[in-house]
Amino acid sequence: MARENYEDPRVLALLAASLAAQQPTLASWGVGSTGVRLVMNACESRCFFCANPGVTNPPPSAITPWSELQRWLEENRSLRLRRLCLVGTEPARHPDFERLLERARDVGFEELELMTSGLRLAEPGEAERWAERGVVTIASPLYAGEAELHDQVVGHAAFERTVAGLSSARAAGIEVRVHTLALRRTLGRLPRLAAFVRERFGTRLALAPVRPKEQLFDYAREVPSWDALEAALDGEPDLSLVGFPLCLAPHVTRGAATSIELYFRGQARRWLPECEPCAERERCGGVLAAELVAARVRPR
């Protein structure tokens, strides 16, 4: 699938921008005074829809250098933004993670949101250290409410450790925001996963569309149609949607952690002819280009 069908260059530009330059774009998207920093590192998981050598075993040159992180953060001494979202391929495993948290606080950030697998949080005392350094929210994925199916998706035995880590975070006072993907293989388990997230972490599960990544997997085979999605959501499971157009399951709540909202804005979108007269068009993101290419969408 061509890059223009799965990547929005506006989000790439936002992630590459200075802290001050990010603010007009974030404001236009309804995001408050926040900084967003991309921290590239090796990912711990082997998810079938994402894993490739560039993600799981990147060359040293691909790891975000400390000098770049330090320089980018310094601008907040004058801007004084309170909140910072750290996104990327497992920032918590970056070699400079600890001093990244310390420097973020030093330049004035008071609240940190971190995109993470949650695995590191299973280490004794780690959640408490994050909370002490200003982490107030984590955004983490779960693909099922049981080990077998979740571990099948992520490619290694991770469920028990992930849940333990996220539970430690909640116990330390960190808000745990869980998201999952709309996959055929997990669609029937959504109500169970949503209930698990609500009971264990006290928050609402966010359901997002799959981002196609070059030729890593069979997109049309793994991604459910809108009809299948709406059937699965018909019982109003306790979850929210992010990254889908507003005409899909309009009765379901929208929203996710800020970092996840931004991440799924990175998917290229198009408009169907049927979208032209829609009263919701101004506040709707449109239809994923990848879904149109794979013929997963039916006209409304």
Image (tube, helix red, strand yellow):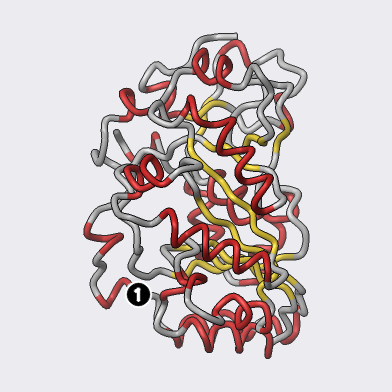
Q: What residue is drawn where x is 63% and y is 42%?
A: 205
Quadrant in which residue 283 is drawn: top right
Work out whether 261 lies above or below 242: below
Position of 298 with respect to 109 (left or right) is left
Q: Quadrant of residue 220?
A: top left
Location of the N terminus by quadrant is: top left
**In this rendering, position of residue 282 left or right of residue 169:** right
The quarter holding residue 62 reads: bottom left
Q: Position of residue 67 (x, y in %)?
A: 45, 87
Question: Which residue is more in the foreground, 177 or 192?
Answer: 192
268 or 124: nearer the viewer: 124
The location of residue 198, given as percent across then percent down, is 68, 45
Residue 297: % across, % down: 48, 16
Residue occupying image coordinates x 39% and y 16%: 295
Of residues 169 and 229, the one nearer the viewer is 169
Amino acid on which disc 1 is placed: Ile
Residue 272's spot in the image, x, y percent? Answer: 55, 17
The 10 Å Cα crowd at callout 1, few under 14, some 14 to 19, many 20 or more, is some
Kindly state the secondary structure of the residue where label 1 is placed: loop
Picture layout, residue 6 above or below residue 168: above
Residue highlighted by disc 1: 63
